[in-house]
Image (cartoon, rainbow, N blue to C red):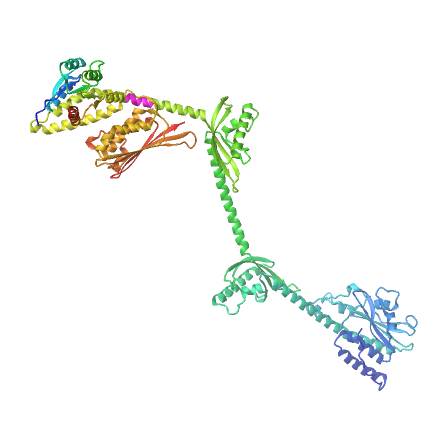
Amino acid sequence: MATPLLRKQLPDPGGFVERRKSVRDSTALRLLSAERSEEIFPILLEEILALGFSRALALEVDFESGAVRPVAALKYQSSQLQKFQSTLWASENPLISLLHGLKPAIVPAGAWEREPLYCHPLIYRNRNQCWEAERERRRECLAVQNFRSPQKLQLQEQVCASCGMRAYAAMVVVQISRDCTEGQLRHLRNLIETANRYLARLFKVEHYYNRMRDMDVTISQMHTVMQSMADPVILTDSHHRVIMLNKAAERFFKLPEGVTEGGARAVELNNLYFSAALSSMAVSGTESHRDLTLVDVMEGEEVLFEAVCAPTFTSDGVRSGMVTVMRDVTDLRRADQEVRSNLQKLRDAEEVVRQDRDRLNLVIENVGDPIVVADGAAKMVLLDPLAKELFGMEDNTRHPAVVRNQARLDAYLTAFTFSFADSQNRPLRLHNPASNSEIEYAARSGKIYDARGQVAYTVTVLRDLTAWKKVEQLQLERRMLEVEKFAATGRLAGTIAHEINNPLEAIKNAIYLLPGKLKPPAHPVYDILKSETERVTRIVRQMLGLYRNTDQVGPFDLNSVIDDTLTLFARQLSTASIEADKQLGNLPPIVGSADQFRQVLSNLVVNARDSMAKGGRLVIRTRHLRATDGLHGSVNIVVADTGCGIPADMVQSVFEPFVSTKGEKGTGLGLWIVKGIVENHSGSIRVRSRQGKGTVFKLAFPIVR
Amino acid sequence: MAKAKKPEVLVVEDEASVLLTYRMMLEEQGYIVSPALSSQEAEALLGKKRFDLVLCDLSLEQNHTGFEVFERVRKRDPKVPCVMLTGYANRETTERAEQAGITVFFKPIEIDDFLQTLKTILRNSHA
């Protein structure tokens, strides 16, 4: 409750009218000097008492709680004031009833106090509209409404629709004497009304002040919010001029101190881009967004933003500018890009895997041998059609033979899967339901490991050993037939050669006897006779070599054949200063014709000897290459010399008949016969030669277990 | 060096033309050659005189072989050097001949090598 200012009691100098006028003027001046609404009531009460009334008080309504209580009083004791405290809902209280009626009235003596009371309710009201209503051309101003039609006090209506101001309500209570005149009362009423005008004005000013304070707080809060946002926020006016920007935005649009020329240019460009973006976005009346690439002035990096732009409007719906919030989407776009490219990679990889799988399936289906793929727990996961026949995946699982096969395979797979071996080859006897017979298979298994080194899968290929052995047998028989054919050819050639041999011997001897018995003109003829006869002699020798009437096909020891051959040529080799180097490995027996092998070696040794006219080294090496699969192996023979070598253009054709590097000395049949014999034994022969360095023959013969 | 007695050589060969050329060649070399066309002729000649060297073809008339001739030669004089000529160069016959100390030449022969070998054999047997 405001304390009334002490006022010097002015003596009543003259008549009532003068006094009234001067009082009115001075009262107006005093009320005008009030700076706060709280000062109005004390001044008013003093003025009322100055008019000669004995005592007065002001009651105020608290709109929040509905409480009615004295805010200022003169000549009342605080105990007496208690009585005036009430609420708006205390309808039995005559003062409250008067307050609701908003009209001044007199509470007669005895109704409330012993003396009559003049009660004057006050409410926020004004003859003129408030500024907001005036500017916005609205009709609804609470002050004017209250002025025009003082109705019953309605709490919920006491808020101005234009400025949002809540009105005040109060009541001035003055104790009057029973003989109070109408003039005195009118005077009192005018005084109170004048005070109310001042009060309304002050109240309005205070309302504006409070609103300004609130707005200041709101603005500072908004500013804090804006500044604390990590995304750049920019406020622009309707001409796209920047009104405000936060720190994040300053980074791009404001020139920092001591910026480089490049930085300044970047800021300039950023502003340009932003203005352009803003203009394009401003076209649409609602919120819009677009991508914007700006340069970070400090870092010098390009940053991709998504700018979201919303127009701002004044309270009367006029567009006042834009708020632009920019979101850094560089990482987002980069991540998006990465996700896309990863997806593509994944799709590509998937395609590769699919193709690989198709290819693998194609391979598995076409191997022609049963294939079983099992997992790390030795459980079958994939069978090719042939394996399905044996182990059943579909309808034949109940067949007793299939069940037996499954048991055998399970035992085999379990043993292999949990063994330490990476691969293994084992025979496996299975029942073939198709042929209804027991068949021996060669099972070859390998392991596939996962990333942790655990067995992920095992792959087992079953080879029908019976069929394989049959094929081997057939091949052997065919080889023997070939050998026989070759031997027959040899026999024929040998017989012919032998028949020629004796006449040839006579001719040769006769020619030998000729020299000295011829006249010189016959000498060239003699030379031709001699050299051509020698050629025929060599051919006959070679053909005789093909014929061996002891030719037998069977197992024999190749090393001893080599020993024999080298012994046979030992004298010739040492005469020619050729060092023979034997490196013979342990060999299994070879099946074939020992005599034919003897001829092969003889021919090769003779060729080597002939190539080393000035001596050299002859190496004969044999080696047994063991089978890696338990089935196939080979015996390899190397015959190497350090002789003159074969001319490069002839290497390809040395195995053809009647091709010789020895000119008149050779028959051109030696290597042809060698190749024929080697191939008859299912072998292969290769030659490598460098002129002046030497020649290497490599022979390989398959060995079947 | 006193002039040595010419070596006596028996040559057995069932082909007349071949036999003739051997004979002429050997005579040219200074040997005294007694030619025989069959094992029987050879047998007859062996009975008449002693030879320093016997040359014989492996295959003779009908089923007769040079080995028969060599056996008879050796029966009379185990030290007489024997040389076998053959067109059928097979392992068995070669081994058999070599075991019996018979030098083997395969037809068609290298004449120079052949003549040189004969000289060496004769020199060794007289030493």
Instruction: Note whether residue A656 is visible.
Output: no
Residue B68 appears at what percent x and percent y? Answer: 21, 15
Residue B4 located left or right of residue A317 = left
B101, A607: nearer the viewer: B101
Residue extending furthest toward the bottom? A13
Q: Is residue A617 above or below residue A237?
A: above
Q: Is residue A315 above or below residue A48?
A: above
Check the picture and name the quadrant holding the C terminus of chain A: top left
Residue A404 located left or right of residue A527 = right
A696, A151: nearer the viewer: A696
Residue extending furthest toward the front? B127
Check the picture and name the quadrant holding the N terminus of chain A: bottom right
Magenta-colored stretch includes residue A482 = yes
Q: Is residue B99 above or below residue A35?
A: above
A541, A100: nearer the viewer: A541
Residue A23 appears at what percent x and percent y? Answer: 81, 82
**Which of the 4 image quadrants contains residue A80?**
bottom right
Residue A695 located left or right of residue B53 = right
Residue A40 appears at what percent x and percent y? Answer: 78, 75
Residue A194 located left or right of residue A656 = right
Magenta-colored stretch includes residue A181 = no
Q: Is residue A222 above or below residue A73?
A: above
Q: How many marks?
A: 0
Instruction: Note whether residue A580 is visible.
Output: yes
A626, A117: nearer the viewer: A626
What segment carries the magenta color?
A481-489
Q: Main secondary structure of the magenta part?
A: helix
Residue A584 appears at what percent x and percent y? Answer: 33, 32
**Which of the 4 image quadrants contains residue A24?**
bottom right
